[in-house]
Every structure is written in structure tokens, then in C-alpha cells.
Amino acid sequence: MLYHELIVTIHLQTDLPATKGYEYLSRVISSAMLNDTELKELHGKRVLKGYSFCNLYPREADKVYKQGRVYLFHIRAFELDLLLKLKYLLPQLKAGIIATEIRNFAYRPIVRLKSLTPAVATVDNRSWTQNNGLKLLMERIQVNALKKYRAFIAEMDEPPENFIESIQLINDKPIKIPYKANSFLGHKLIIGVKSDLVSQQLAFAAIGAGLLEKNAIGLGYCVYE
């Protein structure tokens, strides 16, 4: 199993609050996709997009990225062709993109996942909160990872059990993520992963395509060990 990352270097053209970074970067990526026939079609469909991305780094102490400074962000996907197209398209925008590089990552055993950006699950048209219970959150993570494995890696029978061994919320209160006229409530998570083959495969799907929902606006981007 293999996933890919496009590492993008950007010379920021405006001050940008960190909470607005997700919307800003998703708009940059979407603008690039609209300049390719196949990516434009993907962008317009209500389907799994197959990529996730992190917010800009290095972080700023006051949580505001500064105009004129250089930052990086990563776009991750299983589909190499998607990233190759973005590698070509992004520098053509008037968005301050000054460098792009693709790196490939093979599977290695996964002990735990940590979401660098908040993860969001929808329950009855609202964002999941602690009042909905961790059991429901674990179920949503399992179902979502299975869907992504089947979409981007291979077929898989219904797993006999959840791949999650343990789950921990890093933040005490939900993190509010503004997006256009709306906002989402997300949580940063640490997820312990079982060592059996199926659990490892599902965890890898969550890494490569993003944890839970709204990955195409930068939510659910994970690191692992």
C-alpha cells in the first residue's frame, strides 16, 4: 500500500487567521482543479474526493499567518495522478505558490493516529460532540475508513470488529472551524490502532484519504506512529 503527498510552498499574499486557513487553502486547491476537465468534474460531484491537506506551517504564536512570509502545506492522496495535476496547476494560479514537490510513502505498521487538523463527523445534520458519545464516533470512523478503503485501495469484506483499540480527545471543547457562511465543530483525536491486518488496512485508508468527513476542506489530516 502506498500514498502520496504534494508538498506546497506558498508566499502568503495576505494576513490570514489560522482558523481561516482551511477555507483559504481549499479555495486555492479548488481554483486549480477548475482548470482541468477531469478535476473540475470531480470537484462538482458529491463523492469522496480522495485527498486531505494540513493547515499552513510553521505556526505563528498569535495564530495569524503573516503576509509576505513563506509557509508550507501538504496535500495527501492515494491517487498519484490527482497530485501530479495539482503540481502542474497550482503554480499557474496567482496565489503565491513558489514550489511543489511530490513524495511517496509506503505502508509501515501503525500504532496510533493523531489528527493534526480537527476531525468532523455529522450526526443528524449537526457536528458530533461529546454528548453523542465516543462509541458513536468510533462507529463513524470505522464506517468511513471502510468506505475509503473500498473506494481507493481494494475491495474488503465487512470487518468483524472495529479497528480502533482506544480513542482520546485532545481538546476539551469542540474546535470551531468557519467555512463560508457556516461553521463546523471538530475534535483533534489520538486513536490507538489494533495490530491485525484488517485494522491496519483501515487505519492506512484513514491516513491516505483523511479521517472522517470534510477532508477536502482540510479536516481530518493525520500523522501516525
Image (cartoon, rainbow, N blue to C red):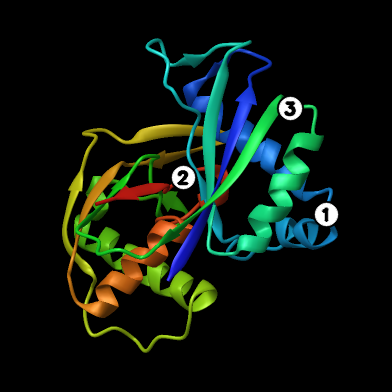
Can residue 140 be seen?
no
Residue extending furthest toward the bottom: 157
**Are dots 3 and 1 in contact, CB under 8 Å?**
no
Picture coordinates of residue 32 (x, y %)?
A: 76, 44
Kind of residue at disc 1: Asp
Whichever of labels 3 and 2 marks the residue nearer the N terminus, that label is 3
Horizontal relation, residue 12 to residue 184: left or right? right
Picture coordinates of residue 175 (x, y %)?
A: 36, 33
**Are dots 3 and 2 in contact, CB under 8 Å?**
no
Q: Examine the image and state in which quarter residue 124 appears.
A: bottom left
Residue at the disc numbered 2: 219
Query: Mark 3, mark 2: which one is toward the viewer?
Result: 3
Can residue 114 be seen?
yes
Element assignment for label 1: loop
Q: In front: 137, or 78? A: 78
Residue at the disc numbered 1: 36
Q: In front: 135, or 112? A: 112
Which of the numbered marks, if any, corresponds to residue 95? 3
